Amino acid sequence: MAKKPSRTYVCTNCGAVHAKWAGQCDACGEWNTLEEMAVEPLAASSAAVRGGKGRRVALQALEGEIKLPPRTQTGIAELDRVLGGGLVPASVVLVGGDPGIGKSTLLLQAASKLAGKGERVLYISGEEAVDQIRLRAQRLGVAGAKLDLAASINVADIVATLEAEPDVRAVVIDSIQTMWLETIDSAPGTVSQVRACAFELIRAAKRRSFSLILVGHVTKEGALAGPRVLEHMVDAVMYFEGDRGHQFRILRAAKNRYGATDEIGVFAMTDRGLEEVSNPSALFLAERRGNIAGSAVFAGLEGTRPVLLEVQALLAPKGGDGAPRRAVVGWDTGRLSMLLAVLETRCGLKLSGMDVYLNVAGGLKVAEPAADLAVAAALVSAASGVPTSPGEVYFGEVGLSGEVRQVAQADARLKEAAKLGFDRAVLPRRIARGNTRSRPPEGLHLREIGHISDLVSAEMEAE
Ligand code: TYD
Ligand code: MG
């Protein structure tokens, strides 16, 4: 019988397991991502299974009483919403994000708030000394919170401490990449260490029934470094995102066993830590200057929440001999090229000799095709030099023949626009069947269009 290999190789990018080392992962195609990992011998566990040591599990009917997990609210509403209503006991949340984005700040604030409600909370840092955490707490104005701190990277010590503290309700580990188990023969941050450390901490959380929050850094490519393999082990994965040049930070759930994954929490980084932003539209539109060509307001949707954003386009005559520039911030480059082609082919707008710059103001990344119409409006406005009406919002998807297509949740978008004082909306024409749109909010005038050329002719007429 062939001898079982005692080592395998795991791709840090996609988590695929390989028997042999290779320069390139053949599952995801990334280079230099394979890392050695020790394999536990399976003999003992399979002997237990075959030896008939297992007990029968109780089988139950599908129909029955449902017990919802109890929740502990952190008191930071933007965080609680993304969690699905608060922290669940014995659950594990992984919070990922670029270094310096504000993960430690967010979790120190949340931990302090929770401790302030009389819960026993531990904040364990492998990155900062206790004094540094105290300084940060002073800066955040939470230095008085009854929070227990520890600076340690030794998971065996941490688990022993947790075993001795039975009333702990929540534990923050900052960060999982710094954690270390003596028994694993590799450096902190490697796949073997990260996995083994997380496994031990998660086991302690399940046994002791506390909520565990793990912080994980993200690589340049945007994946959770090493902990990609962790995503399967935890109950929820959240990303803390934002542009460091901007104030805004967005907490987004990528996986959540106890809640929806499309919710976002919006924060602003101030000199006193993170502040909740309960009305993101007002913030994103705060710096908008009216009466400038090339700007349009998009009525978007982030999760269940409508958000209004400003889309800015700038056209400049192409410099040099090469291809024209297409620079995009906060939107998809491919989608911009498609819209430019549609505007050129279906509406006769001459854009191919122009450099095009597109920006979603505020640093938010928009992934919705519903933004097509707002982007098109910004481009048409930039090309014609006619500003869009300052009280107007846009949403709708644009197809290749220039048709404007329906998008989800028109009502919610219109309501948000009305709430922020907008009085006109340009949106897809209602289709006869499946007409579920209710009456538009008071004071909002709707312009329903079926083709993108309607947008062009209206803008040009205004000239
Ligand atoms: P931090 O929470 O340390 O980031 P992470 O844990 O994700 O690496 O945040 C660090 C940045 O936040 C740092 O550049 C300084 C800034 N910051 C503020 O602007 N205001 C504050 O009150 C605090 C504590 C940090
Ligand atoms: Mg940190």
Image (cartoon, rainbow, N blue to C red):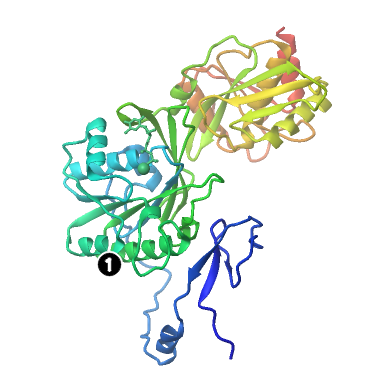
Q: Amino acid at mark 1?
A: Arg
Q: At 49% across and 30% down in the image, what residue appears?
A: 307
Which residue extends farthest top?
A: 463
Image location of residue 199, percent across then percent down: 38, 65
Which residue: 80% across, 28% down? 323
At x 38% / y 37%, what residue is drawn? 102
Q: Quadrant of residue 429?
A: top right
Q: Nearer the viewer, residue 161 or 75?
A: 161
The N terminus sits in image quarter = bottom right
Residue that label 1 marks: 207
> Horizontally, is 104 left or right of 96 in the view?
left
Taking 416 as reference, is 97 above or below it?
A: below
Horizontal side of residue 131 vs 173, given as left or right: left
Instruction: Tell me residue 282's x, y (percent).
Output: 44, 22
* Foreground of the two, 362 or 438: 362
Residue 94 can be seen in this image = yes
Residue 209 seen in this snapshot:
no
- x and y percent of residue 130 in the render? 23, 44
SS for callout 1: helix
